[in-house]
Image (spheres, helix red, strand yellow):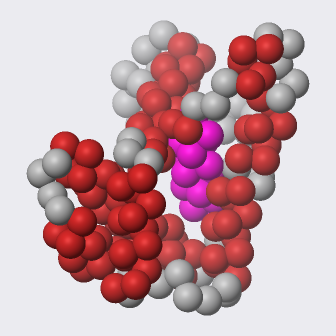
């Protein structure tokens, strides 16, 4: 894993780093008139937004019919889950570096050397690895709330499929 630069890896990297990823998010953040909001760095928002962007590529079908892109995204989901566990266990003192490397190597599919480097980075910056998951979860919660408010009363209670009144499907229709 993380060895080659095929089409799916390029799409995933573009989703994370560019559009709709961190480039877009930081471009908007830097336009804020409030100096504190312009300069404030929240890794949970930046990484969460980028992580959410990767998932948006899958949901919108931008990988096409190829399963490779969806598999690649699912594998990184597992890697980020392993990162979150290692991050918490190291920060709490429950695990040694060696135990964390062993776990991370097994769960991520990274080589031993790559796992050592990743764990060393997590040990130096506790809490950062969890930011991806926390940030994405916060965005998904916010999106669900926005969709709930946009839906007409009782929209989720009607039996049967949503009716199409226009060419665009209503956002509360699954």
Residue depicted at x 24% and y 52%: 90
Q: Is residue 63 visible?
A: yes
Task: Please identify the quarter of the rendering in which residue 96 is found.
Answer: bottom left
Q: Is residue 103 visible?
A: no
Main SS, magenta residues: helix
Residue depicted at x 37% and y 22%: 157
Query: Is residue 105 toward the left or the right of residue 80 in the image?
Result: left
Identify whether 128 is placed above or below 141: below
Query: Is residue 8 toward the left or the right of residue 144 in the image?
Result: right
Identify whether 20 is placed above or below 147: below
Tell whether position 50 is magenta: yes
Of 123 and 131, which appears nearest the observer? 123
Query: How far from the left and from the top, in percent, is residue 167?
Result: 77, 40
Number of numbered markers: 0
Q: What stretch is highlighted in magenta?
A: 45-62
Residue depicted at x 39% and y 64%: 120
Query: Is residue 96 toward the left or the right of residue 122 in the image?
Result: left
Query: How far from the left and from the top, in percent, is residue 116?
Result: 36, 75
Identify whether 91 is placed above or below 68: above
Query: How far from the left and from the top, in percent, is residue 115?
Result: 37, 76
Of 80 and 19, which appears nearest the observer? 80
Identify whether 5 is placed above or below 102: below
Query: How far from the left and from the top, in percent, is residue 98?
Result: 21, 72
Tell whether position 138 is magenta: no
Taking the view exactly as shown, the residue that stands out farthest to the left is: 94
Task: Please identify the quarter of the rendering in which residue 27 is found.
Answer: top right
Residue depicted at x 67% and y 85%: 5
């Amino acid at each position: 894993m993380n060895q080659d630069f095929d089409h799916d890896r390029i799409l995933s990297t573009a989703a994370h780093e560019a559009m709709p990823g961190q480039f877009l998010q930081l471009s908007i953040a830097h336009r804020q008139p409030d100096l504190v909001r312009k300069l404030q760095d929240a890794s949970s928002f930046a990484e969460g937004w980028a992580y959410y962007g990767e998932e948006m590529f899958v949901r919108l079908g931008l990988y096409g019919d190829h399963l490779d892109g969806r598999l690649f995204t699912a594998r990184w989901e597992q890697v980020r889950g392993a990162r979150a566990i290692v991050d918490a266990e190291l920060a709490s003192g429950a695990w040694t570096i060696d135990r964390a490397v062993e776990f991370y190597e097994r769960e991520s599919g990274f080589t031993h050397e790559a796992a050592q480097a990743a764990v060393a980075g997590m040990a130096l910056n506790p809490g950062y690895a969890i930011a991806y998951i926390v940030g994405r979860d916060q965005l998904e919660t916010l999106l669900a709330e926005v969709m709930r408010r946009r839906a007409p009363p009782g929209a989720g209670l009607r039996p049967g499929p949503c009716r199409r009144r226009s060419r665009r499907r209503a956002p509360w229709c699954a």
